[in-house]
Amino acid sequence: MKLNDVARFDRGQVKGDAFITDEGYIKANAIVTRTGVFLYKNPDGTIRKELRHPDEVFKIDSLDTMKMIPVTNGHPQERLVSAENAKRLAIGYTGETITQDGEFVLSNLVITDLASVKDVTDRNRRELSLGYTVDLIPEEGSYNGQPYNFRQSNIKYNHLSIVDNARAGSEARIALDSFDAEEILIEEANMAKRKIKIDDDEILMEDNVANQVEQLLARIANLEAENSRIAEEKDKLSAELNSIKNGDVDLEEEEDEGEEKEEKEVGYMSKENPYATHETPVKAPNGERVPLKPQDKEKRENDKYNNMDAASIRSLVKERVKLQKVAESVLDSKTLARIDEMSDLEIKKEVIKARQKNANLDGKTAVYIQARFDALLEDMTPAPSQVIATPVEYRTKFDHQPADSAMARQAMIDKMKNGYKPGGKIPCHN
């Protein structure tokens, strides 16, 4: 895409020998343009960055178009000067001496109109602005560290205007078509406007203000997202709290699943023996949880232990020994005196209550007790791994069991069954 014959109005300043002749004319040698990246403000307030490359600016064909062109007092509303309006608009002319000075282009000029001479001398209207047409070639790049997105080509100068020192003042503004623009300074570019969308509305505001608004909008979005996350977390915690207040529904369901799995997988050993208390409930045919009858509980325990192998029994005994070792480091002598009559669950309750005086464990499930016990072990000093080491005397007894495997197996079953009953003792085999 190339935009042809787009109007541009660049600025320069009177430099060097400027003087008033005997006839009252002003003659001067002035900087009228330069190379580099130029900033142009379009009619919609947006900024276009265009490169005036030395290859284009100092091209002889282009510089020749600057010779002997009209000087105007402000840019014409007609956009460009032609034979039709030159008599009305021209206040002087450029000369034929066009020179390069580094990155700048200088031209000599003469102003012959009396009113315009007074504007320069009395009103300090000494800024110059070239009017010309160019072809714009879309091109992204950087020149001397300045980014640009268009490159000017085929530069043809039309007129040179004197404008007020006030940058982009009302007298310097002209009616431009959609692709015409007036050169602006960096300070003005910083004040350029762009649209910011707030909710469903698009609001035009200055660029520096727009940046601040965008930052605020981003912070608001982040805060809203964080607020939503906190609200969701609050709802989740409230639901969990209500569940616990209503009877540990979730914990009971978890325990049900564990019991069903253990019934299917005979010999499976967990940290907690759910059959170690007379109050352990089971599911009735209608799905409700009801306490086991003593005879049913005993049969259930017998079936469980009769199906265990020696390794499973040994593992269960080791867990019991570890638990007792923890209890010995926490419980008083009176409670320890009846430890052989207590189930694993009862021991854990006593340990929890000994370390946490205000603990209320009434009606709590085995899963809940186990969770409280595990948390307690993590806080105990020394570490649980040091506290619950298996004592030597227990290991010795296992190492000297009767050689008959059937007798050893039955001894372990009797030991575990009787140890979990009120008044039961764990027999020792020497």
Image: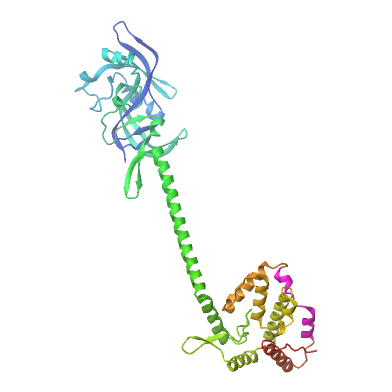
Estimate the x, y position of residue 316 in percent, counting from the top left.
68, 83
Q: Which residues are magenta?
A: 383-399
| 392 drawn magenta | yes
**Residue farthest to the top?**
22
Counting from the top left corner in percent of width and height, residue 330 is at 72, 73
Horizontal side of 162 relative to 321 (left or right) equals: left
As drawn, the residue found furthest toward the left would be 84
Residue 330 inside the magenta-drawn segment: no
Q: Position of residue 188 (x, y in %)?
A: 38, 31
| Residue at 44%, 36% in the rendered image | 142
Q: How many discs appear?
A: 0
Towards the viewer: 419 or 145: 419
Q: Looking at the picture, how far across and down is residue 362, in whole percent?
A: 58, 78
Q: Is residue 142 visible?
A: yes
Q: Quadrant of residue 421?
A: bottom right
Q: Quadrant of residue 403?
A: bottom right
The answer to which of 352 and 136 lies nearer the viewer is: 352
The image quadrant where one finds the C terminus is: bottom right
Q: Quadrant of the N terminus?
A: top left
Q: From what the image shows, is residue 25 above or below residue 178?
A: above
For residue 113, say whether it is visible. Answer: no
Q: Relative to the observer, which residue lies in front, 334 or 249? A: 334
Q: Is residue 419 above or below residue 354?
A: below
- Image quarter for residue 358? bottom right
